[in-house]
Image (tube, coloured by chain):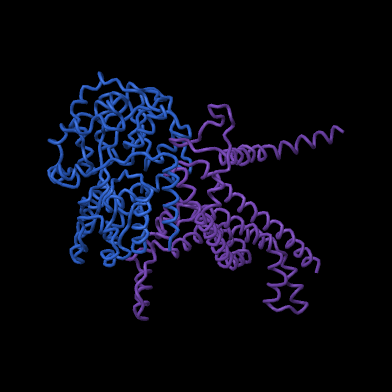
Chain colours: A purple, B blue
Amino acid sequence: MAQQAGDRKSRWLVSGPPLLYLIFFFALPTLIMVLASFRSPGEFGGLTPLVGEDGVLDLNLESYARFFAESVYAEIFLKSVVIALVTTLICLLLAYPLALVIARSAKRRRDLLLLLVILPFWSNFLIRVYAWMIILGPQAALARGVNWLLALAGAEPVSLLFSPFAVLVCLVYVHLPFMVLPLYANLEKHDQALLDAAQDLGANGWQRFWRVTFPLSLPGVYAGAALVFIPALGIFAIPDILGGPNDSLIGNLIKQQFLETRDWPFGSVLSIVLTVAALGLAGLAAWVGRAGGGSGEAARRA
Amino acid sequence: MKRLLITLLLAGLPLISAAAADKLHLYNWNNYIAPETVKRFEESCKCQVVQTYYSDNEELLAKLAAGAKGYDLLVPTGNAMQTLIKQGALKAIDKAQLPNLKNIGPAYMNTQFDPGNQYSVPYAMSITLIGYNDEKIKELGVPVDSWATIFDPKILEKLKKRVTVLDSSNELFAAALKYLGYSANDVDEAHWKQAADVIKKAKPYWAAFNASSYIKELTVGNIWLVHGYSNDIFQANLDAQAAGRKFKVLHSLPKEGAVLALDNMVIHKSAPRPDLALKFMNFMLEGKNAAELTNLIGSGNPNADAMQYIKRDIAQNKAVFPDQAAQAKLEQLQDLNVKQRRLRNKLWTEIKAAR
């Protein structure tokens, strides 16, 4: 009995702090946001009192009605989802070979390569975004080269900066390490003996990858996809800095509600839609991941 | 640079602790006081000035609405100040302690935002106008004396993707309303829709909605014409000259009139040191100190006594110190109510989403 109680105690000691963290920094703020989404915006920002002068609780669905009444909000939201998905896909395609190379290189080189992946984090996010302004600027070599080629083909010059292209490039650049690291963590643990066995059984290089390595790496793929997709969905700084006049995303829209428009309830509604979408997709990924993990088991058994 | 600061602050940079003795906590616009002015004030008051920065009024209001405390002195623009007054967020000032208040020109006292100056003292001002690369504009033969330059597709055809406008619904709507011949403070829904149409038609020609990097883009010559703040355009020209560019970045005040932003010093209700804040106000009302800011950033100056200390080329710049006729067409933006803000935001979102 005492043994059991001690176990329980240590279990709480271990899981308590992260649990408290989640309650205070995720659950509570989300609840506050949900409550705010049903309230009315204050004349000078903030919210009107929860209980009006007439003693009636002031809760309404007006902000939700607004979201669904105007298609323009859903349009921007969908566009953001598409851009986040494309970002995730490109990150996956770029990160997978890189993670594989790192995982299969010699121990000493592996550490160096990992360091290089993490290196960009040593400078501030915004400074890195601003650096892209210079790289993509019309006077930089890249834009000149592209426009020289376009001129050869007889096409009009294009602007790389302030374009959807700039936004996407920077989104991929910023999020790439978040895809590489979980993929690496997964690929690095693979047992070389499985591949040897596959080879003995007559599998060629592609079959070994597609039938053994890839199924086993799916949990890493899902983790990386969630780590890229969720932040990419809510980002506002990159479209603000690198985007053109058509590149506002849901994050910019939410920022506007809290700053220019001072409309906390509507900002909360937009944030809730974002949170629900992100949680929904993360849940979906986890569910598929579990299914995928199952097939990984199958591969291991095979 | 402004957006950069917003982002940093939203990212939750910790608030500088407020408790220590003999510190004046100044919550100010970025680069909105000359370093030598701060130094002299610190010497005269034997105190330390701790500055925190905001990049627009919305950010200031949002932070205070979310409960930020510990600031002594804020420098909001008229409409934001009015909001703060109505929220009861400011402390009334004791004018007996401000003998230098007499230096402020009467045109800038007793504004609609704070009748009788119960809470506020004018600090400096800027005008939202057109800034341009003189070489390119001369080459293209584009007129810059009207808002048509940023709104008329016929003119924009020549400037395609070389124009930025402020990423601010209030400023852009004000410019479009002025272009249509209405007041910048017009609240008629039909007029707003007209303005939104003007903006939507011009949007395909713009490179970006930009409030953060147009100074740099003007300086390097990527962007040839902007809708921006007079102080920023002054800065862009300084930077271009320092970088040895052949062109100049000049201001042009459109003939239809423009938005004037008069920033005011006010004391926050939660100020730990209102006494130091008053000392600072009186110090900044001295002509010499007020002039230093204008000489640094090219801001307009409501201080009559400052004019003698202001560099001649700035004092004679009609876009910084407009003549009487132009001054009559300047308007300070008034705050919108909840319903108007929601309508404005809906129109703005449609503008942003329009193809």
Residue B2 versus residue A138 in the image, above or below: above
- Farthest-out residue, top: B96
Is residue B42 in sight in this rendering? Answer: no
**Nearer the observer, A157 or A104:** A157
Residue B4 horizontal/vertical position (percent): 40, 48
Q: In which quarter of the image is the C terminus of chain B?
A: bottom left
- Farthest-out residue, bottom: A153
Residue B278 versus residue A163 in the image, above or below: above
- Left or right, B314 with respect to B189, comes to left
Q: In which image quadrant can residue A93 be found? A: bottom right
- Left or right, B295 with respect to A109, comes to left
Is residue A255 in sight in this rendering? Answer: yes
**Nearer the observer, B343 or A116:** B343
Q: In which image quadrant can residue B15 be found? A: top left
Q: In which image quadrant can residue A284 be found? A: bottom right
Residue at horizontal 30 percent and vertical 29 percent from the top: B114
Residue A80 horizontal/vertical position (percent): 52, 58
Q: How many marks can you see?
A: 0
**Nearer the observer, B255 or B233:** B255
Residue B99 horizontal/vertical position (percent): 21, 22
**Nearer the observer, B45 or B166:** B166
Residue B20 horizontal/vertical position (percent): 41, 24
